[in-house]
Image: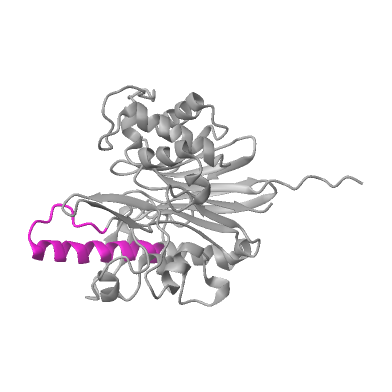
Amino acid sequence: MTEAPARRPLRLASYNVEWFNALFDDRGRLHEDAEPSARYGISRGEQAGALGIVFSAMDADGVMIIEGPDTNSRRSTVTALESFARHFGLRARRALLGFASETEQEICFLYDPDVITPRHDPKGAPVGKKGSRSAPRFDGTFRYDLDTDTAPELIRFSKPPLEIALTGRGLSLRLIGVHAKSKAPHGAETREEIMRLSIQNRRKQLAQCIWLRARVEEHLARGDRLLVMGDFNDGPGLDEFEKLFGRSGVEIVMGCDKSSPFRLREPHAELALQSKVGISPTTARFYLKPQHRYFEALLDFIMVSPNLAARMPDWRIWHPFNDPAVMAVPELREALLQASDHFPVTIDIPA
């Protein structure tokens, strides 16, 4: 008797694409020319071609894109992404957008409609700007006391997390796409300004992560199969301010101080937390001009609920130097370096 072929796992990805928006005109058409992209020393054609190679190589059923093309009165995230997918013949060819960003750079989802069916499904009360202390909808305002002065501040996401209900390959999942606030003290000049703004930004980011954690606990209490994925602009042991506040935003969202049934799993974050010698995977690579060298960090994560972790999924960081399979394909290695300053993270979930 012939055995039935093994079912293909569901592959989901998280990918922060630097300056993706700059590769499209206002009608969503891809720039494939020799003009400079917004990435240093790389043309628009080179970056676009590199992204085509990376997306094709990942071959994911769905990709949570961080810093996706803009949506505003002149531009459409969905039009741009579907144009991109059509140009490169990607099977992930339909795009989904949730609440638009208040600034620029959207959180969006590119997917294969033949395999999965996602829909934007935000949770929480729509409280608007007046705010609520009880984890409102992510396009609203969270009231949280940042500095323990008994007067709660109003916390907002400039890029509201994208909440998706998804079915496909025999699975029913909840996804939350995240782009947490950057801790970088943009605009600060003096040492005092840098310190003040860094602490202020860290507090705001931690408040966002507390808000996220509240939503996570709601899903875990219901037994949902949950993935929280994206760029947290943070990670275990990433900077000295973590000591000041006791823990990173990643640890808060994962629930590292909770019992196992209420703790999200993420092997790369767990390795960084457990390492005593500074060994940690990395997902992003930045050039530091004053030091004339590159710096790497673990910023991008795919966290899963215990009931998904029990399926023994396979995580992968598509790192151009640390992944032997990528290293063996020079075209893919170079494409990853040209495409973005972040590298994709994928998860294969057995169906």
Name the image colouring.
one colour
Q: Position of residue 144 (x, y in %)?
A: 31, 67
Q: Position of residue 63 (x, y in %)?
A: 50, 43
Q: In which quarter of the image is residue 188?
A: bottom left
Q: How many labels does the image show?
A: 0
Instruction: Looking at the picture, tell me which residue is in the foreground, 115 or 273.
Output: 273
Residue 197 shown in magenta = yes
Q: Residue at x 37, y 70 (%)?
A: 278
Residue, far right: 1
Please determine whether, in this image, residue 154 is positioned above or below residue 86: below
Q: Where is residue 52 in the image (x, y as percent from the top left)?
A: 46, 32
Q: Which residue is drawn at 47% across and 48% down?
A: 318
Please determine whether, in this image, residue 241 is positioned above or below residue 38: below
Please determine whether, in this image, residue 190 is positioned above or below residue 107: below
Instruction: Looking at the picture, tell me which residue is in the foreground, 212 or 132.
Output: 212
Residue, far left: 190
Stretch of the chain drawn in magenta: 183-211
Q: Which residue is drawn at 66% across and 49% down?
A: 9
- Can residue 70 be seen here? The reply is no
- Can residue 341 be seen here? The reply is yes
Q: Main secondary structure of the magenta part?
A: helix
Left or right: residue 69 versus residue 53 is left
Residue 203 shown in magenta = yes
Please determine whether, in this image, residue 29 is positioned above or below residue 121: above
Q: In which quarter of the image is residue 180?
A: bottom left
Left or right: residue 128 versus residue 202 is right
Q: Position of residue 209 (x, y in %)?
A: 38, 63
